[in-house]
Amino acid sequence: MIVTILKSKIHRVSVTQANLNYIGSITIDEDLMDAANIIANEKVSIVNNNNGERFETYVITGERGSGTICLNGAAARLVQPGDVIIIMAFAMMEMEEARKYKPAVIFPDTASNKLIH
């Protein structure tokens, strides 16, 4: 049996930009992507803690160390700069592998979107 489980999570980062006039996606600081084991073009689910919106998009690599969290295109209508969001990626795997899998979950500083060590 194949199950879908949480693979990666960036917990509580602040939206830095919302760019309606872009093709679409979410731009994420490459440091955060690496720490959460998320790659460019990966599908992610996003939860907006400020307004309850839940939506999906794909990832674009942002400038390393910038703290950038930018929602682009139509998704820009679902957030405001300063909103706190959770970004999650999921993976499908066999049940036995899933039982042993440990997701990459990071908790950046919400004010700066920088990794807390």
Image: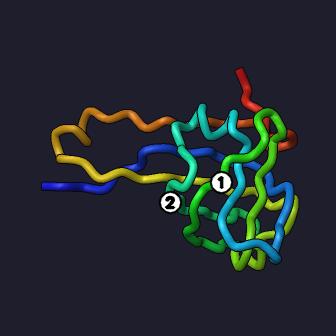
Q: Quadrant of residue 79?
A: bottom right
**N-terminal label among 1 and 2:** 2
Identify the residue at horizontal 31%, vertical 56% (top origin): 4
Looking at the image, the residue that sits furthest to the top is 117
Which mark's residue is nearer the viewer, 1 or 2? 1
- The three-letter amino acid code for the residue at tag 2 is Lys
Identify the residue at horizontal 60%, vertical 54% (top origin): 87
How many numbered callouts?
2
Q: Which quadrant is home to the N terminus?
A: bottom left
Looking at the image, the residue that sits furthest to the left is 1
| Residue 85 location (% of width, % of height) | 70, 57
Viewer-closest of 65 and 97: 65
Residue identifier under label 1:
60
Viewer-closest of 96 and 51: 96
| Residue 98 location (% of width, % of height) | 26, 42
- Asked which secondary structure carries label 1, the reply is strand
Q: How crowded is the residue under tag 1: few (<14 C-alpha within 10 Å), some, or many (20+)? A: many
Q: Which quadrant is home to the C terminus?
A: top right
| Residue 101 location (% of width, % of height) | 32, 35
Residue identifier under label 2:
43
- The three-letter amino acid code for the residue at tag 1 is Ile
Answer above or below: position of 88 versus 110: below
Identify the residue at horizontal 85%, vertical 60% (top origin): 17
Identify the residue at horizontal 67%, vertical 47% (top origin): 61
Viewer-closest of 117 and 33: 33
Q: How crowded is the residue under tag 2: few (<14 C-alpha within 10 Å), some, or many (20+)? A: some
Left or right of 50, for residue 101: left
| Residue 109 location (% of width, % of height) | 78, 36
Cα–Cα span, label 1 and label 2: 10 Å
Colour convention: rainbow
